[in-house]
Amino acid sequence: MFFVFGWGRRTRTDYGQTVPVKCSKCNNDSYWHLARMRTWFTLFFIPVIPYENKHILYCDICSNGVILPSANVDRAIELNTQTKRYLNQEITREEYDRSIDQSQILA
């Protein structure tokens, strides 16, 4: 009997537009996306156990991005929620501007 196992399979969960940033690589003003990257141990090519978990903010145009420290992940998820509310016109621009402070997340 033999087992087929592996590691290094990655999955990505994209949470969507999170914070407006001017990208230093492509010089575009856009909303950077929040994503969670997981690396898995696999058994018979089926992901079984995630052994690495990272959250990243990235430019949707050129894919330039930053890995978020774990202390900033909750703030990024909160910003993601506020940005979705603003883009769906559930809150005003003034309310949105008060709710974001990108210096707290892109540290």
Image: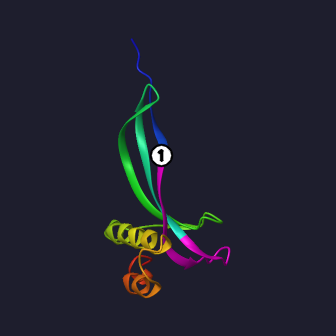
Q: Nearer the viewer, residue 74 or 44?
A: 74
Q: Is residue 8 above or below residue 13?
A: above
Task: Check disc 1 and give the amino acid type.
Answer: Thr
- Which residue is located at x 53 percent, y 70 percent? 32
Badge 1 is on which residue?
11
In the displayed structure image, the side of residue 27 where residue 93 appears, left or right: left
Quarter of the image that includes the N terminus: top left
- Which residue is located at x 41 percent, y 15 percent? 2
Does residue 3 belong to the magenta stretch?
A: no
Does residue 24 belong to the magenta stretch?
A: yes
- Residue 55 occupies which quadrant of the picture? bottom left
Q: Which residues are magenta?
A: 12-31
Instruction: Indicate the secondary structure of the residue bearing disc 1.
Output: strand
As drawn, the residue found furthest toward the right would be 26
Quarter of the image that includes the C terminus: bottom left
- Which residue is located at x 59 percent, y 74 percent? 30
Q: Is residue 63 above or below residue 28?
A: above
- Residue 65 occupies which quadrant of the picture? bottom right
As drawn, the residue found furthest toward the top would be 1
